[in-house]
């Protein structure tokens, strides 16, 4: 079973606050990802990382930022939260393999974020 | 445009019955296709992954098929259980770029009633 953890599971916070969503994995995976998922909709990639000190923007434009200082840790930060940021945020990781995304991705259980 | 379409959007079946979920895709060039199960409030969990050369793969009561010529896949669930109630997501990866993008379907919401 994959070991990837996200905290907090739920967060309700006011507009304008700075938020950091935590994601940690204990599998030693080099690749990590952040997705955004709204109810009944597909997952959208917002950030990914090939390894330490590597971060890239995904397909969906996001006002969030990420960092990758350690292999196991990939936090996502919103400097000033807005109601439009209300969504579920899922973190994932995968092993290096032939082809960038050819290895199965292991997901955390997500953070459900509500901005009032 | 690369897309993944799943049907039906939702499905209700009785415990013990079988069901089949469909996935049609236009992603090209194709690399692999995955099925994930996502329980409510949880992250997706990988069920199967199939490459171009594979046309069927099983994981317990779950059997996925792939027809790369017609760009269709199905997920068959045998002898359904209450714990099968979840969203089932079809994900297709391309190999047309160095990145190898993942394209997600919106999922089929399966409900199993006792």
Image (cartoon, rainbow, N blue to C red):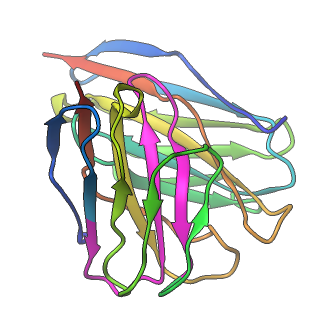
Viewer-side residue, B75 vs B10: B10
What residue lies at 24% left-to-right and 69% top-to-bottom? A1
Left or right position of B53 against B111: right
A35, above or below B31, in the image:
above
Q: Does B113 sit above or below residue A68?
A: above
Q: Is residue B4 magenta?
A: no
Q: x, y (%) of residue A94?
A: 47, 73
Q: Evaluate whether residue A34 shows in this view.
A: yes
Q: Is residue B110 left or right of residue A58?
A: left
Whether residue A2 is visible to the viewer of this picture, yes or no, is no
Locate residue A74, reporting x and y percent: 36, 71
Number of marks present in the image shown: 0
Nearest the viewer among B111 and A63 is A63
Q: Residue at x 27, y 32 (%)?
A: A15
Which residues lie in the magenta part?
A23-50
Q: Is residue B100 above or below residue A8?
A: below
Residue A5 lies, in percent from the top left, at 21, 65
Of all residues, the one furthest to the front in this rendering is: A16
Residue name at image x 87 percent, y 54 percent = B29
Q: In front here: A56 or A42?
A: A56
Q: Is residue A115 left or right of residue A60?
A: left
Q: Quadrant of residue B53?
A: bottom right
Q: Per the image, is A41 magenta?
A: yes
Q: Position of residue A104 (x, y in %)?
A: 49, 65
Location of the C terminus of chain B by quadrant is: top left
On the rendered image, what quadrant is the N terminus of chain B found in?
top right
């Amino acid at each position: 079973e994959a070991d990837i953890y996200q905290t907090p599971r739920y967060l309700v916070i006011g507009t304008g606050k700075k938020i950091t969503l935590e994601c940690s994995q204990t599998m030693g995976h080099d690749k990590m990802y952040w997705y955004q998922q709204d109810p009944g909709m597909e997952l959208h990639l917002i950030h990914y990382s090939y390894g330490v000190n590597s971060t890239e923007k995904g397909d969906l434009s996001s006002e969030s930022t990420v960092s990758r200082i350690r292999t196991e840790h990939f936090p996502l930060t919103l400097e000033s939260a807005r109601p439009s940021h209300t969504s579920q945020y899922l973190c994932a990781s995968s092993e290096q393999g032939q082809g960038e995304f050819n290895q199965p991705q292991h997901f955390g259980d997500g953070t459900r974020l509500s901005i009032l | 445009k690369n897309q993944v379409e799943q049907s039906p959007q939702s499905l209700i079946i009785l415990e013990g019955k079988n069901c089949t979920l469909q996935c049609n895709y236009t992603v090209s060039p194709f690399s692999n296709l995955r099925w994930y199960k996502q329980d409510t409030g949880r992250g997706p969990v990988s069920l199967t992954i199939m490459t171009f050369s594979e046309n069927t793969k099983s994981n317990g009561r779950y059997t996925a098929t792939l027809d790369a010529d017609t760009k269709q896949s199905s997920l068959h669930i045998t002898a359904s259980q209450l714990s099968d109630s979840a969203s089932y997501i079809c994900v297709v990866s391309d190999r047309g770029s160095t990145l190898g993008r993942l394209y997600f379907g919106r999922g089929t919401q399966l409900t199993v009633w006792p």
